């Protein structure tokens, strides 16, 4: 299952690609010429392209930060941790008091641009060498560039874009492109990927036609392009090999990885360790350990740092008889009463934890710090998400409420185990039902903040300031490096 991922650290290329140039951050703009592989001596064989592609996939592991902060920034969870100063950048985002000097936001900027630049390196030389299967590698590189650019535009709005590698000095000459232009590049990349990939991945964990269709539908939805979103998502639902698993409880366990509901999944493993000095170097899912129960001792789980704790209001969003609640939310006191487990409490303790991504008991032979090397894959796009996005597109686009109901109710029928909870509403009432369903179906998976913002509901988040907190600030260093070329986002 994790074979493809395990190859990543074995490639010496990563030493080079790990220094891929960020758009403008000095973390990636030091003396890269010393380490760069000369393009004249590279991309001469299929193996060269394949190894470079692995290096692009490798950056996906750093998106653990995007996921956990997507929850903490929303009204689903509080930051938690040990104290009010434990990962202070996360605490600030939770309270909506973050500034341009937030180091955690700078991590997201740097890491996502590293992913863009690694993809651009391949695409810059995509025509250098021909071989069977080259179109697949190029299509995957374009999917991944779209994935990273989508993360950047979600978080920061207008961003600098380029279709070849960013170079030192670009930050003073390349403008922040309007959001419309960023989305246009993303759409072009994803349409290419849709047309050049199949529904069967060459290896587990790699992107497919379905991954590209789902992300394209999401990109359309974020722009309120409802007919386009409805069309591509409907095609995916009809033609793709995906379905809902029968038992929701299995999705987030090891046996549920890369299953029939997984449209795109970020692969993690615990066979190689990491440390706090380089969290993005971890082959494990860092967010899992950070979400774990503090000082936990008991069955099924291992301890963690008690971040990202669900609030009562989010827990109460689940309806009676919803089978998802006990899968998504761990009521730690009820669990302790049932199993005899013991635990400690951290800052902002609510009594609840994100059960989907809690660290599970596993072999003590795992490498490095167990809190940083959890092997739980991240289900980046699930088929349930596809169904709910399609429902929203058909409903909000005034296209077909009956079809929207059918997609929504497929998700609800699994959630309740019957048809008695089917939604029959239309119009705005149906829209609200879809919003509710997205929240409870996808809680803990990092989507809710962006769902609220893109649908104009950001003020539901405590501390949220309209016309400011829809976007996060460009890191101050990037503004300084641009030498007046870029302006900061409004309100910061």
Image: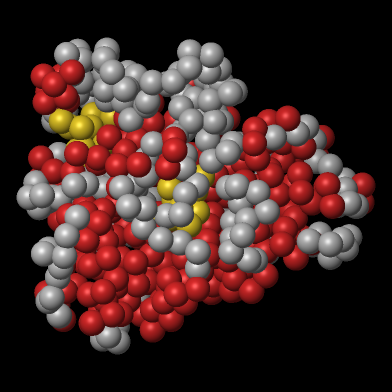
Across and down, in percent, residue 80 comes to 23, 29
Q: Is residue 52 left or right of residue 83?
A: right
The location of residue 32, given as percent across then percent down, is: 75, 39
Image quadrant occupied by the N terminus = top right
Instruction: Using the image, determine if residue 255 lies above or below residue 302.
Output: below
Q: Horizontal placement of 243 versus 58: left or right?
A: left
Q: Residue at x 7, y 50 (%)?
A: 320
Give 379 or 275, whichever is nearer the viewer: 379
Name the quadrant containing residue 221: bottom left
Total numbered circles? 0
Residue 122 horizontal/vertical position (percent) = 75, 55
Q: In this view, does 446 lie above or below 215?
A: above
Please say if 236 is above or below 96: below
Q: Residue at x 35, y 42 (%)?
A: 250
Q: Residue at x 90, y 52 (%)?
A: 44
Q: Can residue 158 be seen in this view?
A: no
Locate residue 20, reporting x and y percent.
69, 43
Picture quadrant of residue 64: top left
Q: Left or right of 258: which side holds 421? A: left
């Amino acid at each position: 299952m994790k074979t493809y991922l395990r190859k990543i650290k074995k490639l010496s290329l990563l030493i080079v690609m790990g220094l891929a140039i960020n758009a403008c951050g000095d973390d990636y703009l030091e003396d890269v010429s010393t380490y760069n592989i000369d393009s004249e001596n590279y991309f001469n064989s299929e193996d060269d392209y394949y190894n470079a592609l692995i290096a692009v996939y490798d950056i996906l592991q750093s998106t653990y930060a995007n996921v956990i902060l997507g929850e903490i920034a929303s009204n689903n969870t509080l930051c938690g941790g040990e104290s009010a100063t434990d990962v202070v950048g996360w605490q600030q985002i939770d309270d909506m008091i973050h500034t341009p000097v937030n180091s955690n936001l700078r991590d997201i900027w740097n890491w996502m641009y590293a992913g863009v630049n690694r993809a651009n390196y391949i695409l810059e030389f995509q025509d250098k060498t021909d071989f069977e299967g080259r179109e697949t590698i190029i299509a995957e590189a374009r999917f991944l560039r779209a994935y990273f650019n989508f993360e950047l535009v979600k978080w920061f709005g207008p961003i600098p874009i380029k279709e070849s590698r960013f170079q030192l000095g670009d930050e003073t000459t390349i403008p922040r492109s309007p959001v419309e232009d960023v989305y246009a590049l993303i759409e072009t990349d994803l349409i290419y990927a849709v047309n050049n990939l199949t529904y069967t991945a060459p290896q587990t964990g790699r992107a497919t036609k379905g991954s590209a269709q789902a992300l394209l539908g999401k990109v359309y939805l974020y722009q309120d392009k409802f007919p386009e979103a409805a069309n591509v998502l409907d095609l995916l639902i009809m033609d793709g090999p995906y379905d809902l698993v029968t038992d929701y409880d299995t999705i987030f366990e090891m046996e549920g990885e890369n299953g029939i509901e997984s449209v795109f999944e970020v692969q993690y493993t615990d066979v190689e360790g990491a440390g706090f000095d380089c969290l993005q170097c971890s082959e494990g899912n860092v967010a899992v350990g950070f979400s774990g129960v503090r000082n936990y001792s008991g069955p099924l789980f291992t301890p963690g740092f008690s971040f990202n704790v669900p609030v009562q209001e989010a827990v109460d969003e689940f309806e009676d008889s919803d089978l998802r609640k006990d899968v998504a939310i761990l009521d730690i006191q009820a669990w302790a009463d049932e199993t005899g487990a013991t635990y400690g409490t951290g800052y902002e303790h609510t009594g609840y934890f994100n059960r989907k991504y809690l660290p599970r008991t596993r072999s003590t032979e795992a490498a490095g710090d167990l809190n940083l090397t959890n092997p739980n894959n991240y289900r980046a796009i699930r088929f349930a998400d596809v169904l709910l996005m399609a429902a929203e597109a058909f409903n909000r686009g005034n296209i077909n409420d009956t079809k929207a109901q059918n997609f929504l109710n497929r998700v609800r029928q699994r959630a309740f185990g019957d048809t008695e909870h089917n939604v029959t509403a239309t119009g705005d009432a149906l829209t609200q039902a879809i919003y509710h369903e997205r929240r409870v179906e996808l809680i803990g998976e990092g989507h809710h903040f962006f769902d609220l913002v893109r649908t104009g509901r950001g003020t539901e988040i405590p501390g949220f300031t309209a016309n400011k907190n829809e976007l996060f600030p460009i890191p101050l260093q990037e503004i300084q490096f641009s030498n007046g070329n870029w302006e900061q986002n409004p309100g910061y």
